[in-house]
Image (cartoon, coloured by chain):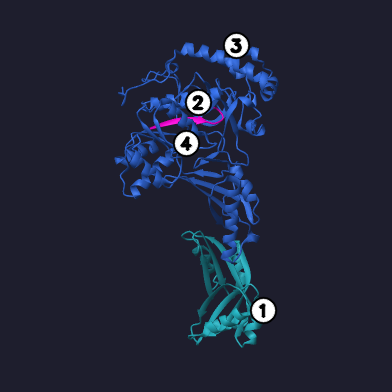
């Protein structure tokens, strides 16, 4: 067995709770939650009624399967805060997902929610080596995105010193690391690689920097990427997971074993389901994670479909934590792409393309990660009538597509114009996306 | 007085330009001259071909989308200042040149400039007024056989 590379400190005794006791705690919280949302949130009352289920029928943890699912679409349709379960005066914070189609998906927190959230982040940070005496550089965006603030409160909870560098300005990030000598880096994994590459290109050996640990999340990444980050920066890199709809970062995180993320089950019930049948998969099988947030006051979610595909591992962990571990996210059960932290659906690209006259509705999206950052290329076909012998006109057509996609998704993508009929027509379900990033 | 030019939009990738040329070769069609506009990502191949209608047909049969546009061909003296003189006329009339390319015949002291104007009729009139030799299709292809 692997020896802990640092003292294995458990932040919260609930992390090692006896599993029988955990189940009673979960059931107690679930019953209370179901009753509360039924009485305070019209959306849930309606959904329960439609599923012919009432709060009294939830008598065991297995009964959770009688409850209806909640989806991102539900949150969107109840924009801005239709699913609020407390009076508005009780909320102290709004956050949102990085969704870009017009309106973001908003969530809310009470004072207690912020406290719970901070504690959850503190748990995985400590499990991954954070100590009170450390300096921590947070290079996550602060704002509606939950990454910056969530981790900020977690680090503060532990009592370490925060350098809230936020994202961007990589030269300054490196300057701060050189001068303040932080022990811990918090950002997206691709930005960590970006910092390493930028340092190398500036003649600085990133291994020589003060960093010892990194806590990375906010996007899908791979073991290959972990190895690269660990090697280039000379640190231990830990994975953490969360989504704003459930609470934000802190839903799960890794211990020193770096072998799956402990789900904080005293606050969340996790299910791993076949996305087509919505039946549970066998242990260790890939399925869609569905979370019920047991402790959230302001905007709890019942059986929220994350669309994230992962595996659950109930085997006891050498670190002593008794909670179930989830694998990395291996993919999505919908076609959402996460490009540089922004959620994009192929349907948005389609919407943009259809608005440009002279472009056919056939397209192909290619996603790659040539260096540290994601690149997205949209290949589109020019309609025969729109072809011109003038290069300028073709360039203008291309620029129009680029701009339209930017207007709808908020990101700049590469657009390639192709001659008519050069994109393969499929007879069945069109395959519109080629992901070269090899995640999973 | 205008010449029919055929053009094709091509991906900027190895091998793309040879495909239409192979189709023409197989059908025994000769290219009088050509120009290629290239950007980082796409190219536009423009061809002057005597049998342009046949060329269009065989290229379309091979799956290409072919555009036909009218261009203006003028004869200039193949010596310093020959082109400058023509450009001055165009400039004075305020006519925009979308693109142009030049070639010479195997014999003779004249070169041919192919222009794509935004106002071809106005350009032809101005050129003829100043005594520039604007070639029609018959003249152009006759010269190429000399």
Position above or below: A73 against B27? above
On whether disc 4 and disc 1 are found on a single subunit, the reply is no
On whether disc 1 and disc 3 are found on a single subunit, the reply is no
Label 2 and label 4: CA atoms lie apart by: 22 Å
Per the image, the residue denoted by label 4 is A220
Q: Nearer the viewer, mark 2 or mark 1?
A: 2
Per the image, the residue denoted by label 1 is B122
| Quadrant of the frame with the C terminus of chain A | top left
Q: Under tag 2, what secondary structure? A: helix
On what subunit does the disc labeled 4 rest? A
- Name the N-terminal-most of marks 3 and 4: 3
Q: Are circles 3 and 4 on residues that touch, CB within 8 Å?
A: no
x 51%, y 20%: residue? A267
Per the image, the residue denoted by label 3 is A59
x 62%, y 49%: residue? A352
Tell me the chief SS of the magenta region.
Answer: strand
């Amino acid at each position: 067995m692997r020896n802990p590379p640092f003292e294995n400190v458990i932040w919260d005794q609930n992390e090692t709770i006896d599993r029988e006791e955990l189940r009673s705690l979960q059931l107690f919280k679930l019953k209370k939650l179901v009753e509360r949302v039924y009485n305070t949130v019209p959306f849930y009352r309606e959904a329960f009624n439609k599923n012919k289920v009432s709060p009294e029928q939830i008598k065991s943890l297995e009964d959770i399967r009688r409850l209806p699912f909640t989806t991102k679409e539900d949150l969107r349709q109840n924009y801005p805060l239709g699913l609020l379960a407390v009076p508005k005066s009780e909320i102290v914070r709004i956050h949102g997902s990085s969704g870009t189609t017009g309106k973001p998906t908003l969530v809310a927190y009470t004072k207690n929610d912020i406290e719970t959230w901070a504690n959850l982040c503190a748990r995985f940070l400590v499990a991954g080596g954070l100590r009170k005496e450390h300096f921590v550089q947070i290079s996550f965006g602060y704002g509606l995105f939950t990454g910056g603030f969530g981790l900020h409160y977690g680090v503060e909870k532990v009592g370490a010193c925060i350098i809230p560098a936020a994202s961007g300005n990589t030269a300054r990030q490196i300057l701060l690391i050189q001068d303040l000598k932080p022990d811990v880096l918090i950002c997206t994994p691709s930005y960590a690689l970006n910092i390493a590459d930028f340092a190398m290109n500036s003649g600085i050996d990133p291994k020589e920097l003060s960093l010892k640990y990194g806590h990375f999340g906010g996007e899908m990444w791979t073991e290959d990427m972990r190895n690269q980050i660990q090697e280039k920066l000379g640190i231990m890199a830990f994975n953490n997971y969360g989504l704003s709809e459930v609470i934000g970062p802190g839903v799960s995180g890794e211990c020193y074993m770096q072998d799956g993320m402990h789900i904080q089950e005293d606050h969340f019930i996790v299910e791993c389901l076949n996305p087509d049948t919505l039946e549970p998969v066998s242990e260790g099988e890939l399925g869609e994670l569905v979370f019920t947030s047991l402790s959230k006051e302001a905007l709890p979610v019942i059986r929220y479909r994350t669309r994230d595909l992962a595996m659950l591992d109930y085997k006891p962990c050498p670190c002593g934590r008794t909670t179930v571990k989830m694998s990395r996210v291996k993919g999505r059960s919908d076609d959402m792409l996460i490009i540089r932290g922004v959620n994009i659906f192929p349907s948005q690209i389609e919407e943009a393309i259809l608005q440009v006259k002279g472009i056919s509705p056939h397209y192909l999206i290619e996603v790659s990660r040539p260096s540290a950052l994601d690149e997205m290329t949209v290949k589109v076909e020019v309609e025969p009538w729109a072809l011109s012998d003038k290069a300028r006109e073709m360039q203008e057509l291309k620029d129009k597509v680029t701009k339209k996609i930017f207007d709808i998704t908020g990101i700049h993508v590469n657009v390639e114009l192709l001659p008519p009929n050069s994109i393969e027509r499929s007879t069945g379900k069109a395959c519109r996306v080629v992901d070269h990033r090899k995640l999973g | 007085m205008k010449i029919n030019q055929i053009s094709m939009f091509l991906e900027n990738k190895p091998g793309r330009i040879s495909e239409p040329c192979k189709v023409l070769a197989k059908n025994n069609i000769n290219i009088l001259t050509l120009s290629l506009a290239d950007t980082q990502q796409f190219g536009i191949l423009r061809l002057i071909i005597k049998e342009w209608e046949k060329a269009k047909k065989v290229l379309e049969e091979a799956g290409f989308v072919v555009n036909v546009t009218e261009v203006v061909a003028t004869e200039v003296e193949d010596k310093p200042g020959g082109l400058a003189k023509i450009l001055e006329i165009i400039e004075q009339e305020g006519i925009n040149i979308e693109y142009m390319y030049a070639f010479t015949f195997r014999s003779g002291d004249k070169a041919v400039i192919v222009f794509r104007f935004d106002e071809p009729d106005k350009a032809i009139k101005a050129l003829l007024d100043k005594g520039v030799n604007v070639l029609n299709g018959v003249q152009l292809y006759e010269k190429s056989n000399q």
